[in-house]
Image (cartoon, grey):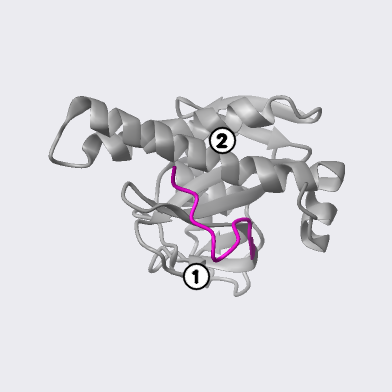
Amino acid sequence: MSSATPWAEETFGVWAGQLAEAIPASLVEAHNRARHGHEGVHTQTLEAYGHGLHAAQYEALAARLSSFGEAVARRLQGRTVMIVGSNVIYPIRYAKKDVPVTAARLRKAAGFRADLIRRHGPEPMQQAFDLGLEDLDEQHVHPDLALLPPELRLIIVAYACSMEQGVMRVEWGSAELRREDRYLIWHHHEPLLPRDTRRAA
């Protein structure tokens, strides 16, 4: 079993080491399933791989983490998201090539992912100007977020993965979403996959 970092132990307690192993393994499994799906349909585009990976990342995480004593599954936006202790574990593929996690950026500044980060991520490092928009935003928050207790903390699992190279990077940590350019601003992040390791099958 890999040794857990102080941050992981503080965040997840006794489950830190097992999570540090289970999460990368589940993403590798998701990649393998998506790649096999692509090979099965013989398309010239990567649609089957991309859609398959998106669905399989949640399923593989849920399958591995469901045996953890404190793990609870929640259906959000049609996907199973795992909660361990007081933490929501949420995967995001941020790149199709090997680039740093600091390059992670959402496609949209609104919608479920953005709302999840704003509601359950860390407090922003720099407070936005109060233009009276916060109340307006609250009216348009994704309804599935009401299924999560407000005290839960979001742990983002950000990973870089492609069909050809497999899972290249996996990091976890906490981040806020910068509204103006949709970049994730990391308050803390650390690797789950050794830098010289390639985990494609």
Give the side of residue 86 with respect to residue 113, left or right.
Answer: right
Residue hosting label 1: 102
Residue hosting label 2: 145
Q: Residue furthest left?
A: 44
- Residue occupying the point 54% across, 71% down: 128
Image quarter where the C terminus lies is top left
> Crowdedness of circle 1 by 10 Å Cα count: few (<14), some, many (20+)?
few
Give the side of residue 158 with respect to residue 149, left or right.
Answer: left
Helix, strand or loop at label 1? It is helix
Q: Position of residue 48 (x, y in %)?
A: 25, 33
Q: Amino acid at mark 1?
A: Thr
- Work out whether residue 14 or residue 178 is closer to the camera in this orientation and state it: 14
2 or 1: tag closer to the N-terminus: 1
Q: Amino acid at mark 2?
A: Leu
- Work out whether residue 42 or residue 87 is closer to the camera in this orientation and state it: 42
- Magenta region, residue range: 190-201
Residue 148 appears in the figure: no
Q: Tell me: residue 139, above or below residue 133.
A: above
Helix, strand or loop at label 2? It is helix
| Residue 31 lies in the magenta-colored region | no
Alpha carbon distance from label 2 to label 1 = 26 Å
Q: Position of residue 114 (x, y in %)?
A: 47, 50
- Residue occupying the point 56% across, 65% down: 195
